[in-house]
Image (spheres, rainbow, N blue to C red):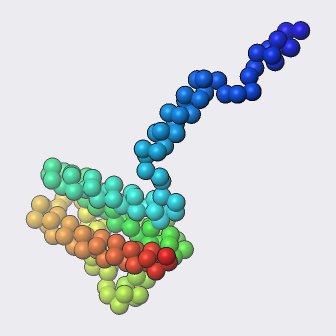
Amino acid sequence: MAVKSIKKCRSTSPSREARESAKKNSASKESTPAPPKTASGKYLELFRKYLAEAEELYRKGDLPQSGEKYWGATAALLNAIAEERGWPHYSHRDYAEIVEKLSEQLKEPLGPLFANAERLHANYYNFLSPLNFEAHREQTLKLVEKLKTLLTQEQEAQQ
């Protein structure tokens, strides 16, 4: 008998609390930008995040952490490009191979620019002077621009 009374109490429509919760969740989903639909989109989002953080840390004078973020931004772009092309991108060696393949495709040596990003990554141990850090940063930003342009062109060609 107790079972019957429990069943009678259950409603087939959602409770008021459930409806209000659903409304709140719906509203918060509308105000939150949709996540990228592709893996390369996620990497592009990471690139933007890391680059913004790198620039902020650079302005504050935290060169070791800034260098790590510039490296992260570079790696995220390489991941996005590799993801679009179906290339492996899970190790430092993979990044070097991606740079070599892109250099051949573009008929332009990207290796020296990539070496600057690697140097910023190594500066986690804080050995670069501000003068040399700035030189590596400028070259890394050149690489970032080239990679962004390449990725944008590829994405436009796919549309």
Q: Nearer the viewer, residue 122 or 114?
A: 114
Point 46% across, 62% down: residue: 41
Point 19% across, 70% down: residue: 138
Point out residue 90 in the picture as x, y percentages from the top left corner: 49, 65
For residue 11, which quarter of the picture?
A: top right
Point 47% across, 39% down: residue: 27
Q: Describe residue 22's horizontal placement relative to residue 98 as left or right.
A: right
Point out residue 134 in the picture as x, y percentages from the top left corner: 15, 65
Q: Residue furthest toward the left? A: 131
Q: Describe residue 120's horizontal placement relative to residue 92 as left or right.
A: left
Tally of marks: 0
Point 55% across, 29% down: residue: 21
For residue 106, which quarter of the picture?
A: bottom left
Q: Describe residue 148's horizontal placement relative to residue 93 as left or right.
A: left
Query: Is residue 154 shown above or below 125?
Result: below
For residue 68, which quarter of the picture?
A: bottom left
Q: Residue furthest toward the bottom? A: 107
The quadrant of the picture occupied by the N terminus is top right
Q: Residue furthest toward the right? A: 1
Point out residue 131 in the picture as x, y percentages from the top left corner: 10, 65
Point out residue 14 in the picture as x, y percentages from the top left corner: 67, 28
Q: Nearer the viewer, residue 118 or 152?
A: 152
Query: Is residue 18 shown above or below 42?
Result: above
Asked if residue 40 can be seen in this view, the reply is yes
Asked if residue 64 can be seen in this view, the reply is no
